Image (tube, coloured by chain):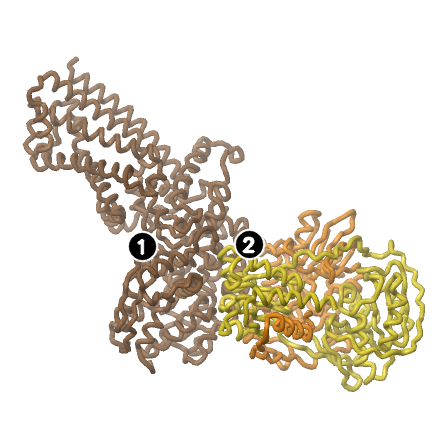
Amino acid sequence: MPGILIVASALEGSMGRSSVELTGAARNLAGPLSLPMSAALVGQGRGIGQAVETLQQYGVQTVYRCEHPALTPGQSDAVLAALDLVVTKAQPELVLISADTVGREVAPRLAYRLRAALATEVMSLAVDGRAVMARRQVYGGRAIATLEVTARPAVISVKPRAFDVPQPQPVRGTVEEISLTIDPEALPTRVREAQSERAEVGLDDAQVVVGGGRGVGGPEGFKLLEELAAALGGAVGSSRPPADEGWVPITWQIGQTGKSIRPNLYVAVGISGAAQHVAGVSGSRTIVAINKDPEAPIFSLAHYGIVGDFRQVVPALVAKIKAAKGA
Amino acid sequence: MDTIVCLKQVVDPELPQWDFAIDPATKRQVRMGKPLVISTYDENALELALQLKEKTGGKVTALTLGPQGEVKDAVRLALAMGADEAVVIDDPQSPQRLAADKASVLAAAIKRIGRFDLVLTGCESADWVERAMAPFLAEALGAACVTFISRAESRDGALSVRRTSEEGFQTVDVRLPAVLSVTSDEAIRPRLPKVKDIMAAMRKPVANWTRADLGAEDAGGAKGVEVKDVSIPERTTKVEFLEGEPAEQAEALVARLRALKIL
Amino acid sequence: MSITLLRGAIVLLMLTVAAGVSARKLWRVYRLIRLGDGPVPLQPIGRRLSHLVIEVIGHTKVFRRFSSGLLHLFIFWGFLVLLSTIIQVFGEAFVPGWTLPVIGREPWFVLLQDVFIVLVLIGVAMALYLRLVVRPWRLVTQDQFGAYLILGFITGIMTSLLLSRATGIALGHAGWAGGAIVSRAVAGWFEGISTPVIRGVFEAAWWVHIGIVLYFLTWIPEGKHLHLITLGPNVYFQKARPRGALAAVDIETAERLGASRAEDFTWKDNLDVFACMECGRCTEVCPASNTGKELDPRRLHTDLRKQLTAVGAQLLAEVPPDEIKRPALVGEVFSEAFLWQCLSCGACVEECPAGNDHIDKIVGMRRHLVMEEARLPENMEQALRSMEARGHPFRGAAVTRTAWTAGVQVKRLDQGATAEWLLWVGCAAALNERNHPSMRALVSLLHAAGMDFGILGDAEVCTGDPARRIGNEYLFQTMAKQNIATLGRFGVRRIVTICPHCYNTFKNEYPQFGGQYEVWHHTQLLARLLEEGRLRPNGSLRTAVTFHDPCYLGRHNGEYDAPRRVLGAIPGISTVEMAQCRDKAFCCGAGGGLYWFEDRTGERVSHARTRHVAATGAQIVATACPFCTLMLEDAAAATNATARPVDIAELLAQSMGPGA
């Protein structure tokens, strides 16, 4: 039955949040296009049964259950083999995949095999007539592009966290078992080892950067900033004065004479906002400034400002972030 | 190991914000008179290819698709860094094309180049960020595919690569031939060419092909996807001050960051 | 055989041996020097000779330290005058009582000789006082043994000379003694002493004198004493002013780029190292050395001399290249940090009494690092990459090249306008908002004076200066040729620029590639416009200002007065000079490409400069270079200094009152 197929992943033994987000994304389209929603559930382990229930909780009518020991984290080739079978059976009009490690490999390859249209890294979805309107960031976040997807089938990869977890909408759906014959030895790629511990995030690549300035006062202050960066999964940088003073390595320096960064979030702590430094961070999507001087020029650049002593604000922030992540 | 590295030239992503403009006709960034650079991760891909070559031997070919007049500098830089030869596919329309469209041309070119063990691309282009080129090429060439890798070493005729994942890193064994997309890493920071290499690059062979040579017809955009609009979001320059005690300020900020999906 | 004949034969033998030993050593030094290549600039003879006379005879450089200068003047002039007595002493070996023909017996000449014997001894006493009591850093860190040895020789030569003259008078066979008041006074001590004793003293003094002189002769071609011979030619062949230009390299044909071995330098560089008398004045004024860094311009020369001597010996002995024993010049003898700490400010060059050029050698080794090995500090590499890709070294600049023109009227040559003058903005002024007010002030002044000028706008790219100082001669030449083509396309002949680095490059370096322009620094043009009455400041600023000399305007181009004339024309301003001003000015810390990377060892150069400013009590530090403005602004903020930098153009514009 043609419809919207989401790719739900239980590769780690249970289904994660991003698969549920996909049901929300699919719902945006399913209603206006009058299409049923199905899911290809790929994975292994005991959590699969729970995953089927969760998908039905969120309105998935048909679950194509693909269970195989080879469907483990990072095994894109195995996932693709499973999806090949599912799409042959389901003949979907639209396939939604989370643009995660596996999804960003699988989505274009599936599109190629289906001769389907492709839109990747989509942030929001809407319908205009029969067309799917997909919005995504381009030019390093400087612009937003709207893609009109008219062809069918189409594969759309959705940026994790772009959609909220929707309200549950339970349905009594059906489950179709897909029998898989995958020979792991025959797959061209094999994940040998996974390190869940994140190695230190480089300043150039970090999506979150905490920058410290003269106001941080010394190397001890930067310890607090490192805690904040760790809580946010980001890296620590600095403006010129701390690097000059030797509080931090010179490789941490951001600005005209240092690195130029454009993370999703930049938190400027104790940084006045000299043009020299601003030049290196103005491409950041969201800027938060923490400074005790309400007149500091950094506030004219920031989206959110906190006037106060970072020695109090930063620990409070670390606590709240940890609490929010735990929730 | 014979490697083909796909390089794309883009308008300098570090251009000041007020030099950044969208051409309403092409719905792409205005290119005229702006400095062009090799897209960030493509240089990492080239560096990785060169390091593999230094260890295992073989040949590195730089492959680029773009308006011929514009891509010369990119090709020269690649050759100066150490690529053995270069292929330029002239396509004045390439800045307007999406990955699916360009992948078919690049795949045709790679087939024409002939033997290869490895094709490397950047993990994403600095302009359109589709992250789709390596998987497309892998399909078109019938090769293995791993994306977002930062390290690779040769191991019994296959490769062992390090892929960046949400949780950290995965070590993946890949059979050859393979198409890999490369992200950045301190170990593959692009090298600065020596002057004698720059001079030597002037004498290295560059093949100039056209889209038509490769038999790619002008599809005019990827199949069934059209760019309707590209807009620059209005920047709200007004800062929102978060008031209260530190704990309240922190609470308020966390709420904002969750709303923005950063947390 | 008569006594006289025997004496003559012995002296002749001694002289032959000593001269032979000395000549052998000198020949060796000559061959070591000639291991280097490079042109031999004999022309223009007149200017070079007069320079030689002024610097060597006039001791202008030596006198930059007064007491050292005076004592050295005594000894040096004493050496010139008393050459005559040395010749006479040797003459006496053959003809007793022989003197120089014509003047040898003139009372005034004899008096002169006597006076200089005393002055030289005074000079030696002053030198001993300096070394033993004052003990300045530069002298206590020197080869002390050599210094005392030379002072001992001089003392020995003088006392033996004086004794032989005095005893000669006492013995009555000095018919020339009329003018010798000192010798005669000493002769008085011998009254009442028996003639044989006096004769004995005479003989002893005479032989000691000849012995020391000859022994000294064999010593001269070693170590720092060699400057007696090498300094003259070194000053003669010194790079002609302006010294801002670095030598061009033919990239296409050069076998090796830059210097990484002792024999890779030019013959003049080699002559430099043999002319160095290790006085340490270079290190004493070096901003890097003064802020606790490793760079030591004196060691640059002494270690190069050691390397050239050791490696050169093997080369001259035709040891096969791969068997030559040597430490790595770049990395071992001189660490990379040492080489990257140089600001190319020229303070050492200005100071050097031997006429040495330190910058050429350091840039030579940087060229090797950058062009042959592609190894340089990351931030410098980023600046160079940015120059290549974007035409400017300020990676991540948040503004466009013409952003500063918002709200001011400026002709755009790149948009078809024509003008008599090109206002060259330069990247440091255009791409750093901190300098935009200076640019707008300058434009308002040029308009007020009715100047016909325009800018190149988007067609302007970096002159290439940072690349050249960092050592990427290839990139510099590429950019220079590109700029010369651009300037030619727009028919540019007269250029005014706010940046002394651009100024220096246009004026002194582009001619190497056929770019000839009339180049003015903005302070020079403003001074001229004030003198012509085309600018009439009226508003009083009532503030105390000190002027910070940019290295590339001052030392490298000799322009110290124009900026001061402009300041002097502004009503109400009182100027106060720093102790380190004009040719003794201390760099802001940005020169030599160090704006992009400064070694963090020790104090920041800019912070040290801020202390100099603070010592004057001035409220404003006037600048004439956008780099200095950026550095001093950051340093003032970092050190909570009160005096902030303001470009001279801005100060002048403020005094022009509203509407100007």
The colour assigned to chain A within the rendered structure? yellow
Query: Which element is circle 1 on?
Result: helix
Residue C568: percent from left, percent from top: 26, 69
Query: Which element is circle 2 on?
Result: helix
Are the numbered discs 1 and 2 placed on the same chain, yes or no? no
Residue C110: percent from left, percent from top: 10, 34
Residue C114: percent from left, percent from top: 13, 34
Q: Is residue B178 above or below residue C167?
A: below
Toward the viewer: B222 or C542? C542
Q: Is residue A88 left or right of residue C614?
A: right
Toward the viewer: C402 or B69? C402
Residue, x 92% and y 63% (percent of image)?
Answer: A180
Q: Is residue C596 left or right of residue B152?
A: left
Q: Amino acid at mark 2?
A: Met
- Chain appearing in brown on the rendered image: C
Q: Which residue carries the number 1 mark?
A: C584
Q: Is residue C49 left or right of residue A233?
A: left
Q: Which residue lies most toward the front here?
A: B245
Residue C76: percent from left, percent from top: 22, 39
**Do the residues bearing badges 1 and 2 touch, measured as CB atoms within 8 Å?**
no
Categorize mark 1 by other alpha carbons within 10 Å: few (<14), some (14-19), many (20+): many
Q: Taking the image as drawn, is residue B92 in sight?
A: no
Q: Quadrant of residue B139?
A: bottom right
Residue, x 34% and y 31% (percent of image)?
Answer: C25
The colour assigned to chain B within the rendered structure? orange
Nearer the viewer's eye, disc 1 or disc 2?
A: 1
Q: CA distance from mark 1 to mark 2?
A: 42 Å
Q: Which residue carries the number 2 mark?
A: B199
Q: Which residue lies most toward the top here?
A: C1
Q: Chain of mark 2?
A: B
- Identify the disc placed on residue B109: none
Q: Is residue C290 above or below residue C147?
A: below
